[in-house]
Image (tube, rainbow, N blue to C red):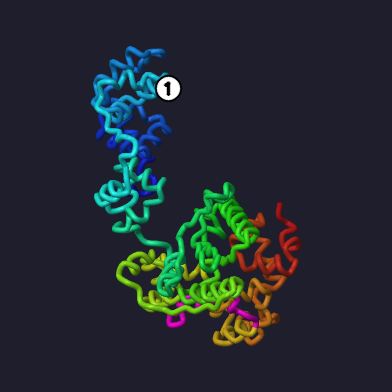
Amino acid sequence: MNKPKGFWLRKKNCVDEAQKYASRSEWQKNNPLSYRYACLYGWLDDCASHMLKVKKKPNGYWDKKNCRAEAQKYASRSSWQDSSPISYRTAMKNGWLDYCASHMVTSRKADGFWTLARCKAEAKKYRTRAEWRLHQRSSYGKAVKESWLDECCAHMDRGVKWFGPSAIQEFLLAHDVAHKCEHRFKSEPSMAKLPFDFYIPKYNLLVEYHGEQHRTGWGRKDADAKQIQARDALKKRWALESQYNYIEIRNWEITSKSNIWEKLTDGLRRAANREGFQLNLVKRALTPRERKLVKSRLKWTQEVCCAEATKYSSIGEWQLKSASSYNAAFQKGWIDACTGHMERKLHKRNYWTLERCAEESRKYASKKAWINAPRSGYTTAVAKGWVEQCSSHFVDGRKLVGNRKWTLEVCRRLAATCSTRAEFKSKSASAYQRARVRGWLDECCAHMK
C-alpha cells in the first residue's frame, strides 16, 4: 500500500519500519525508500540499533580456499549467488567457479535438449510470457532464438494493447490482411533494434502509430521526446529510402477508431496502386480468439469521453469523479463537445468582449453592485480598460461637487487639530484622501513637523 506524501520524512515511521527486519541489507531490499530517507537524514544508526551487525570481511579475505569453504554451505550455484554474492562474484572473476561448485548438482540441460516440442510443453505451465521468462530462462531463450515464441505462446494471454495498435490490428484481422506485429528487419544492422508497429508484406507497407509520448516524451521530458522523435525520423527515412510504403498515424490527430480505419484504408489503397493491384477489402466478424488478441487498454476517445461526461452535471464534478476522462478531453480539446449539457460555473476563455461587459453592467444599479456580482465581467473590464465605457449609465452616489463635505476649508480645519500626517489620516481617511487627490495636502499640513 502506498504511503501518503511525506510519510518517510518522520523519523518514527522509519524506526517502526526498520523493526520489521533483522539486518540492514534485508531492510534495504524490502523497503528501499524508507532506508534511503533514514540514510539521508542521518537516522540509520538509531533505526538499526536492534539489528545484528555483520562483521565485514577484511580486504583479500575471499581467496580460493575461503570461496570454496563458503560454497560448501550451498546446494546450488543460484543459492550461493543469492546468499553470498561477493564470494560468488570473486570465484567467477578468478575462474574458480567450477572448482568451488564441484559438489553441487547442476540443473543445466544438455545441448540440444530444448526442442520445439519441449519448449511448447514447458510454455504450457505458464500464463504469460513474462512468467515463463522469469521461471525458465533457458527454454524461453531457445524459443526466442529459434523464432518459436508465437507458436509456443499461442495459449497465453498477452495482455491488453494500447488503443492505437489495437484498432489497427482489429482492422487488419477483420479484413484478412496478413501482417506482422513489432517487426524487425534483422538483416539491416542500423534497424535491427528498431521494430515497426506493423509490417504488411503483400502491400510492402510499414505502419507506425505514434502515441502522445512521441510528441511530449515519457513523463513530459523534453530530452526523452527528442530521442523518440529522432528514432521516428530514422525509421521513416530508412523505410522510404528502402522503397517501402509507409503510413504514420499520430495519436493527437485522431479522435476515434473510425479515424484510424479511414487512414488505414487510404494508406492501403495507395500502397496497392503502387504495387500494381486493386484493393479489395471485405470485412468479417472477429473470432473469440481474435477479439481477445485485440483487446485494448481503456482509452478515452472522444465518444467515450462524451459518454462519461453525461454522467455529471458540472465540469467540476466530472473532473473530481473521473479525472482520467476529463484530462484526456482537456488535452485533446474536446471539453466543449463533451460539456454542452453542463451548467458552466466559469465562462469560456475570451468570452468577455466590450459589448458583453457593457451589456452585463447594465443589469446593475451601481458600479459597486457590478463589482460585487459574481461572473459579471468586471475584472476583464478593468484589465482591458473598459470600465469608464461600461459605467456611463451609473448614477454617481457621491455628493455633488458643490455640496461635498470635504472642501479645502474643512480639510484645513481638521488638519489643524493634528500634529502629523499619520494622525490626520487616522482621524479621517476620507478627508486625507480628498486633500491628497485635490493637491491640498501640503497646504493643509504646512504646520506639521
User: Does the magenta-highlighted stretch encompass residue 339?
Assistant: yes
Instruction: Classify mark 1: helix, strand or loop.
Output: helix
User: Does the magenta-highlighted stretch encompass residue 226?
Assistant: no
Question: Residue 182: where, in percent of width, then height?
Answer: 47, 57
Q: Nearer the viewer, residue 212 or 119?
A: 119
Q: Nearer the viewer, residue 106 or 2?
A: 106
In the image: residue 240, left or right of residue 63: right
Please identify the quarter of the rendering in which residue 249 is found. bottom right
Please identify the quarter of the rendering in which residue 312 is found. bottom left
The answer, for residue 443, to whether it is visible in the render is yes
Q: Bounds of the magenta span? A: 334-354
**Could you tell me which residue is drawn at 32 percent across and 72 percent down?**
287
In the image: residue 411, left or right of residue 82: right
**Could you tell me which residue is drawn at 55 percent across and 70 percent down?**
253
**Could you tell me which residue is drawn at 43 percent across and 82 percent down?**
341
Residue on which the image places disc 1: 93
**Could you tell me which residue is drawn at 35 percent across and 22 percent down?**
97
The answer, for residue 47, to whether it is visible in the render is no
Image label count: 1
In the image: residue 92, left or right of residue 357: left
Q: Nearer the viewer, residue 100 or 355?
A: 100
Please identify the quarter of the rendering in which residue 73 is found. top left
Q: Main secondary structure of the magenta part?
A: loop
Q: Is residue 361 above or below residue 180?
A: below
Q: Is residue 282 above or below residue 78?
A: below
Question: Residue 246: where, in percent of width, then height?
Answer: 58, 65
Question: Residue 239: where, in percent of width, then height?
Answer: 60, 59
Hey, what amino acid is under mark 1?
Lys
